Image (cartoon, rainbow, N blue to C red):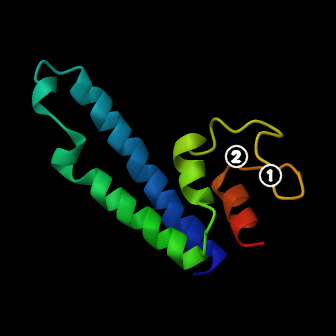
Amino acid sequence: MTKEQFKKHLQTLVDYKKEEDRIYNLMRKSILKDDFSSILFGIGHYEGLIVGILKDACNDKYDYIEYWLYELNMGKEWKANSVRDDNNKSIKLKTISDLANYIYK
């Protein structure tokens, strides 16, 4: 998978996650909220599959994709010097491009 393909696919996943969050927040406000579950839509299963495929395609053996998606909240929680490589050099992981540049270096 090329870096451009990776960025395109990850951007699509991010767009889907944002839409899922929007729907989930709407459901939480519903009087029927106890009857809803995100698993009902199967979204979590597909998301895990997509992340796994991207990880395998990019040989992301250190799970930077999952870290960026979940721990850094798609880069929103990244702060300067919060992520460092083996040489103690800061890794910028704010955007999809930052993540792709690091994985494809």
Taking depth in this image into account, of 20 and 59 the one nearest to the observer is 59
Q: In this view, does 17 lie to the left or right of 65?
A: left
Q: Mark 2 points at which residue?
A: 94
Q: Do callouts 2 and 1 mark residues in contact (Cβ within 8 Å)?
A: no
Distance in Å between CA atoms under marks 2 and 1: 9 Å
- 37 in relation to 31, above or below: below
Residue in the image at 48% along x and 52% along y: 14
Q: What element carries label 2?
A: loop
Q: Can residue 73 be seen in this view?
A: no
User: Residue drawn 49% across and 67% down?
Assistant: 9
Mark sitting on residue 105: none
Q: Percent x, y for residue 69?
A: 54, 49
Image coordinates of residue 82 in percent, x first then y, are: 77, 39
Question: For the C terminus, which image quadrant?
Answer: bottom right
Task: Please tell me whether residue 34 is drawn above or below residue 47 in the rendered image.
Answer: above
Q: Which of 67 and 40 is in front in this view?
A: 67
Q: Quadrant location of residue 4?
A: bottom right
What is the x, y in percent for residue 67? 58, 50
Element class at badge 1 = loop
Q: Which one is in front in this view, the residue at disc 2 or the one at disc 1? A: 1
Kindly tell me whether residue 68 is visible in this rendering.
Answer: yes
Q: Within 10 Å of the Cα at label 2, are there few (<14), some (14-19), or many (20+) other Cα atoms?
A: some
Q: Name the residue under label 1.
A: 91
Label 1 amino acid? Ile
| Residue farthest toward the front in the current orientation of the protein | 86
Quarter holding the N terminus is: bottom right
Q: In this view, does 8 lie to the left or right of 81?
A: left
> In this rendering, is residue 60 above or below 19?
below
Position of 79 compared to 56: left or right? right
The amino acid sitting under disc 2 is Lys
- Residue at image point 52% right, 44% down: 70
